[in-house]
Amino acid sequence: MTAVTLSLVQARQLHLAAQGLLRPPSHTARFDDLLATIRRMSLLQIDTIHVVARSPYLVLFSRLGDYPVSWLEQALAQKKVFEYWAHEACFIPTEDYPLLRHRMLNPSASGWKYNQAWMDQHQLDIANLLQHIRENGAVRSADFAAPEGQKPGWWAWKPHKRHLENLFTAGELMVSERRNFQRVYDLRQRIMPDWDDAQHALNETDAVQRMLDNSARSLGIFRSGWLADYYRLKRAPVTQAIAGWLEQGLIREVQVESLGTLYLHHTLFAQLAAPQAATHTAILSPFDPLVWDRKRALELFDFDYRLECYTPEAKRRYGYFVLPILHRGALKGRLDARMLRKAKVLEIRQLWLEPKTRVSQQFLDDVQRALTRFARWQGAETVEVNRLPPAMEGTWPLRWEI
């Protein structure tokens, strides 16, 4: 097979094509598009921060355009997706439940997510909790009061919250729905009534191979070091997997400018033969698969990105919840935004450009339109910009109506 040499721009475009971020949506979103988008990414990471739309909704908006956020809850309630630990906490297509079941059956390998000593210490309370759910239906953590005198704090979980989370990690409970984005827990047997471990479960070796398959497809173009992070795999047989895919013709080796040897997934072979230019501009979530592997984002997009919401304010370089700006195949900036919901204002506290970003009229128009779409989808009627980089000062209004 003839050796293929790609420019860095081409490699980025292939990755964006795999992720559904190469071109704007071609039609108004439908419910089935949401499911197809999650399957395309394999995983949709969950985060609860909501200074703007919560991350899973934003990741979908970046690919689908305007859509009702209720669709994600609908997909969960209809058992089209389920929640579990994958990259981190994620929505996952239900057909991939067998890939994660082995983790549930060995929860002690999940680190901080499962505490066997706690489960042993509270056996009676946990048994009573399961009986309560069995007799009375699904519950939220909010249904149970904290012990008197417990101090508040980010990790100051009340006992029932700890019980629920441990049972969730062990696969005894699943999330049946979200209410105000709070998990509602129910028995696995009620959500997956036809599941039988003896008949349906995969062993860890087969499950890991399937996760690597998904990772390769969702990345589209990759180096070996990028694969295991997608599902947070440890000691994954990446070298053997790549050798097997090469032998089967499922991937091919390519040489990429400044990156060296990468591998291209067969679903993009046609894109290689008839390349499409990147035309999409979008505001991304910090937990978007495009940037959640910070090392990959740096290597492929030359985008040095850190999430600073857990960094003390005085030590932040940028801001609390900074969103990357994707413009026509490159990550060209970032912005610190918050949605003032009562005032119906999207506030851009500050916007930064990456070095060497050319501030063309096309860039200005594309980003302003992207911000307008982003704001309108969240119910804003106005966009306010507090601070721009010098190269953009005087090029935009600092306030515009939608």
Image (cartoon, helix red, strand yellow):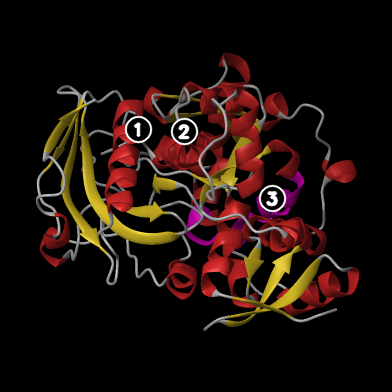
Mark 3 vs mark 1: in front: 1
Q: Are marks 1 and 2 in contact (CB under 8 Å)?
A: yes
The residues tagged by marks 1 and 2 sit, at their Cα atoms, a distance apart of 8 Å
Does residue 312 appear anywhere in the picture?
yes
Q: Is residue 297 above or below residue 56?
A: below
Disc 2 is placed on an element classified as: loop
Residue drawn 34% across the image and 35% down it: 374
Amino acid beneath label 1: Arg
Position in image of residue 75 (x %, y %) = 60, 26
Q: Earlier in the sequence, mark 3 or mark 1?
A: 3
- The residue at which mark 2 appears reads as 65
Residue neighbourhood size for the residue with mark 1, other residues' Cα within 10 Å, grouped as few (<14), some (14–19), many (≥20): some
Does residue 323 appear anywhere in the picture?
no
Q: Which residues are drawn in magenta?
A: 98-115
- The residue at which mark 1 appears reads as 373
Amino acid beneath label 2: Gly
In the image: residue 268, left or right of residue 137: right
Q: Quadrant of residue 148?
A: top left
Mark 2 vs mark 3: in front: 2
What type of secondary structure mainly makes up the magenta span? helix
Amino acid beneath label 3: Leu
Q: Is residue 250 magenta?
A: no
Q: Is residue 25 above or below residue 332?
A: above
**Quarter placement of the N terminus:** bottom right
Disc 3 is placed on an element classified as: helix
**Mark count:** 3
Residue drawn 13% across the image and 53% down it: 388
Q: Earlier in the sequence, mark 2 or mark 3?
A: 2
- The residue at which mark 3 appears reads as 100
Disc 1 is placed on an element classified as: helix
Position in image of residue 62 (x %, y %) = 45, 41
